[in-house]
Image (spheres, rainbow, N blue to C red):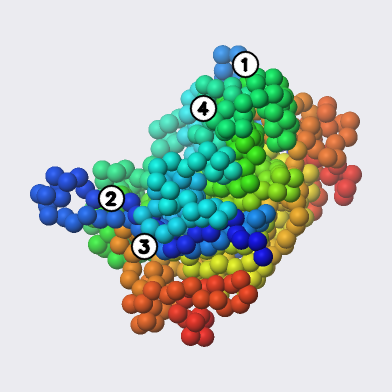
Amino acid sequence: MTPPLIQVENLACRFDVSPGWASRLLSGAARTWVRAVDGVGFSIRRGETFSLVGESGSGKSTIARLIVGLERPSGGSIAFDGQDLTAATGRRTPAVRRRMQMIFQDPYASLNPRWRVRNLVAEPLRHADSGNGGRAQERETVARLLRMVGLAEPDGEKFPHEFSGGQRQRICIARAISTRPDFLVCDEPTSALDVSVQAQILNLMLDLQRELGLTYLFISHNLAVVSHVSTRVGVLYLGRLCEVGGREQLFERPRHPYTRMLLDSVPDLSLSGRARTPVSGEAPSPISPPPGCTFHPRCPLAEARCRVERPEPRAVGPEHEVACHAVEEGRG
Amino acid sequence: MTTTRDQTGSAPPSPAQPPAALPTPEPSAGGEPLLSIRGLCVEIPRRRGTLQALYDVNLDVRAGEILGIVGESGAGKSMICNAVIGLLEPPVRIASGAVWFEGRNLAALDEAALRGIRGARIGAVFQDPLTSLNPLYTIGDMLVETLRTHLPLTPRAAEARALATLEEVGLPSARERMGHYPHQFSGGMRQRVVIALALCTQPRLIVADEPTTALDVSLQAQIITLLRRLCRDHGTAVILVTHDMGVIAETAHRVAVMYAGRLVELGPVRAVVQDPRHPYARGLMDAIPRIGRPVGRLAQIEGTMPRLDAIPAGCAFHPRCPRRVAECERVAPPAYAVGADHHVACHLAAEDRP
């Protein structure tokens, strides 16, 4: 078996949210940290779509930003194609940056409004070491990229404000694939879009994956979208992975109580008339997460052990890991 | 859409409702509607011509029912809400048509008269709970102020009712929380407070504009359950605007589908979700990914919704419609009945099942 394209081990990231040092001195308050990502490990294989789902504050976007290097981890390691990205001091090499690109959630905020689309799409090319083919070749490449994402060559002369949200996301995708990357990190790429436009963008991403052999890390809070695009899925809760599994396993035989709760919360289009059992409570603050299993205050299966001991991920089937004492003890 | 074109804007369909008819049973197809929108056109005057934000909308809301309004951004969903509660921001204005509520045409009332209805008879819940709450007031103050503005209550009685409402919307330790400010609440709790504010005066109608969009799925489920229960217990009618078809499917009794400022389909939720008849509604339903129903590619509607300054002639959907005929390019389709209580504005619907 070939090694995974991305191997994340024990990844952690914490942010300092302490008051200023003068306030701390006066009030005697201690430093406070948000553990946005707390010991997360997973791997992504070539050509697959690995998705991370979770509610707001679960650390999905922080993981995305850590992997592309927009954030520095406070612990753990990220390996890309066998190469450790966290060991290297300073900036990542241009070769790595060329092979790894990102699509952001808000296509209104991620394009410079003063640039023409052809410049926006060509910018990554100009920075990548391979992009020194002269103006004519660049123009040709941009035209080809625009056609690939369903836009026309003359669109290159326009500015971002002349496009709708869906078209802007197409521009972002053209920009992301311009350096011929093998790995795309997509952070909620369709969350700001209407469903009919979402379908267009998801189809485009699927087509491009097939044509270019891309590997995706797909971040979303929308379980239906995740079930549509993913090969494997990881469920995050307060910065920790509580369940990782193949799409079928996770959506048809979810084991972790939180995954079950999430799936039960998705509004049902089939009008089965099933009785909803909405789980009470909200995710607690990641500044002072509960001890033990962070889900225990909302968990119907919580016992004394859950309140003190942090559950580690354990295999419950082929390629299916769950971090839950209740599942491990056969209570879940 | 439930009446023919020539009745547009004619006589008031409903006499004044008795104020406290609680609880109302399940909404039935018959009976006087609580709210009747007739031939509503809303326009946005611009320097170069006027934009039609809503065009000839006909819609009834029955007592005690949840009417869902779905559509994509810019389809005019929120415009209907704002027209109903009289919060259209100038220069946006009602060009023609009527909004009948308890025997009065809201579209013709002045601001002072509207203030007597808004808050007391019609409550509102908006998308972002943080911007609908005043950060300088405790939630107790806000509830008491709302109650005393609209109802002749002593401060003590208002406080008791505020507390009862907060307990009803499921706010834990409500008595203590009365003295807290909005920033001290989490997102889900804030939305409960907003619902309590809309509900405390026991209005007949609540207009909820994307009430769960800013919330996580688990909270969304809680808020939906809450809305449904309150609606049933008090017989309050709800206009629920959302772009999330799943929320509609689980909550609404009837659903209206909007496209480019027009109502394209209106019917019982089961009929519209399982067998949408308008090509746009059908496209919309097929475009939604669903858990446990893997498909290779999602069905997609080509193109995008037209901008308000470029709405095509005839049927507004015809350039994107896979089933268009010559007539669609010239004639705007009227509403055809295609089933019990189910209407579709599409020329093909007339042929499908007259």
Callout 4 environment at 10 Å: few (<14), some (14 to 19), or many (20+)? some
Q: How far apart, in angstroms, are the residues tagged by discs 3 and 4?
A: 36 Å
Label 1, secondary structure: give it: loop
Q: Earlier in the sequence, mark 3 or mark 4?
A: 4
Q: Is residue B345 left or right of residue A36?
A: right
Mark 3: which amino acid? Pro
Q: Secondary structure at mark 4?
A: loop
* 4 or 2: tag closer to the N-terminus: 2
Chain that bears disc 2: A
Q: Is residue A296 left or right of residue B232?
A: left
- Tell me the residue that label 2 is attached to: A17
Q: Residue furthest bottom?
A: A330
Which of label 1 and label 3 is nearer to you?
A: 3
Whether discs 4 and 1 lie on one chain: the answer is: no
Q: Are marks 4 and 2 in contact (CB under 8 Å)?
A: no
- Chain ID at mark 3: A
Tell which of B316 and A324 is nearer to you: A324
Q: Nearer the viewer, mark 4 or mark 1?
A: 4
Q: CA distance from mark 4 to mark 1?
A: 31 Å
Q: Residues within 10 Å of mark 3 (few under 14, many from 20)?
A: some
Residues tagged 3 and 4 counted as in contact (Cβ below 8 A): no
User: Which one is in front in this view, the residue at disc 3 or the one at disc 4?
Assistant: 4
Q: How many marks?
A: 4
Residue count near mark 1 (Cα–Cα under 10 Å), binned few <14, some 14–19, many ≥20: few
**Residue B64 visible here:** no
Residue A188 percent coordinates (x, y): 55, 48
What is the spatial separation of the Cα atoms under label 1 and label 3, in whole angstroms?
52 Å
Residue tagged by mark 1?
B49
Whole-number angstrom distance, CA of label 3 to CA of label 2: 16 Å
Position of A82 with respect to B334 (left or right) is: left
